[in-house]
Amino acid sequence: MTHHGIEGRRRWLALTILCLGVLMIVLDTTIVNVALPSIRTDLRFTETSLVWVVNAYMLTFGGFLLLGGRLGDLYGHRRMFLAGLALFTLASLACGLAHTREFLIAARAVQGLGGAIVSAVSLSLVMNLFTETAERAKAMGIYGFVCAGGGSLGVLLGGLLTTALSWHWIFLVNIPIGALVYGLCVRLIPRGRGQAMDGRLDIGGAVTITLALMLAVYAVVNGNEAGWTSVQSVSMLAAAALLLAAFFVIEARVRAPLVPLRLFRLRNVVVANVVGILWAGALFAWFFISALYLQRVLGYDAMGIGLAFLPSNLIMAALSLGLSARLVMRFGVRAPLVAGLLTAAIGLALFSQAPADGSFLIHILPGMLLLGLGAGIAFNPMLLAAMSDVPPSESGLASGIVNTAFMMGGSLGLAVLASLAAARTGAAAAAGAAPAQALNQGYQVAFLGGAVCALAATVLAAWLLRTKLQGRGEAREEAQRGQAH
């Protein structure tokens, strides 16, 4: 226990820096939601193409999370963290200066790539800085809180910056933060070498899975305009299916696969990932569509949207910090997960009833509170379920896979539900409904779809998840090892 002097203090400082870097990335998933209505008017997005401002980021982020982690293992985590940070900061500058739709979407895609590398590598850096069990648990708790709390900060900051300055500033604010984190990281985080495990990178795997998802999302997003049975839609979905098949073939054949298929023989891994996909689809769609509902149907400004989201985000952050873990200790993984998912499904169902002249206290707050509660309870057990059957040496990989499933499910779910909303709104407008009424009918359908996704996730988790978790014994042994050192 000699490494506690200045070394110990420096480690907590280094953790703070890493968390700042991660906070910037987490902020960017939510800060944009509040500014979406302003971006939409300013750059003349259509309702469905607006989805790309969120999806371009989420797709590259999800698509390169696993590859980012692998790059860190091969070339050193610190080096990749700095590279990802630099890429993210430069892409933020590009987003902030964007004056056309295409440029903004391209810059968001690059931002997602940088964000994926930072996210994937930072967790490994935290693990390397804190080797002792008790300290590591504390560090992971702080890291998890930053990830969950960053969302609420993003929503408020987004509202403030958009209202006070303009939407450009939600991206430009990353530049000073990025530069600061970079400088401090160079000074504080020790140089580590990569453990060249099997010096090979599964680029083929990363490219096929990301392209497959991008094509699928593109087909879904443009399905309403092009027509679902049109040559474009059908050929794109077919190409996506072929690429997905190619991905599985590649993973089965290469020596160092991105996703070792043997992990999918583990029941809890599969269930947790399917649940994660459904749940993320519901969650991201709720976030995206309720922001539009608040602004376009109820007439809130960016700051108002930020404040409306605050209760649910604060509950989420508070729960993820302590209560969620305690519930898992007490009741195991399955019960809290099912309870959380069910609560969120009810929240979404309430949202689907919100009228075009809804009031905040009656129609919005109850759903927001239930969603915050549900998400806060469900998130931890979902990660734990995904990692419960996996040997400790592969826990990083398992958490990477569930995070990837989450991002992919989020972008696909968002695309599908936003398309449903647009189709319903179009039909209602054609039937002669007033604009706000037509929009509201579309949003109601999307919320209902989200509730169905969350409910399906609840049923799957309740029915298929095994509650007996291996790893209690391992944790005890590890704790004893920690005391022995």
Image: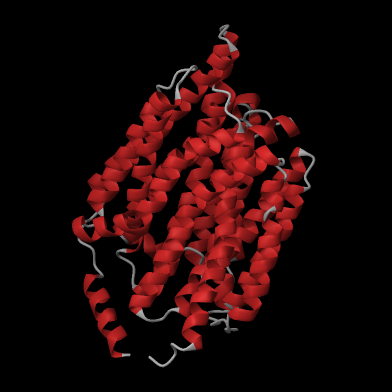
* Of 102 and 8, the residue lying toward us: 8
The answer to whether 227 appears left or right of 457 in the picture is: right
Apparent side of residue 8 relative to residue 207 in the rendered image (left or right):
left
Residue 122 position in % (x across, y down)? 53, 69
Count of marks overlaid on the render: 0
Q: Is residue 286 above or below residue 405?
A: above
Who's the residue at 29% across and 39% down the image? Answer: 342
User: What percent of the width, then of the height, locates residue 314?
Assistant: 42, 47
Q: Quadrant of the N terminus?
A: bottom left
> Residue 399 is drawn in which quadrant?
bottom left
Task: Classify 466 as above or below 417.
Answer: below
Determine if residue 373 is in view.
yes
In this picture, is 287 found above or below 431? Answer: below
Q: Position of residue 368 (x, y in %)?
A: 41, 36
Question: What colouring does the structure picture have?
Answer: secondary structure
Is residue 235 in sight in this rendering?
no
Where the C terminus falls, by quadrant? bottom left
- Residue 207 vs residue 189, the one in the foreground: 189
At which x and y percent is residue 309? Answer: 48, 39
> Quick one: which residue is furthest to the bottom in this view?
2
Q: Nearer the viewer, residue 425 or 196?
A: 425
**Between 337 and 315, the one nearer to me in the picture:** 315
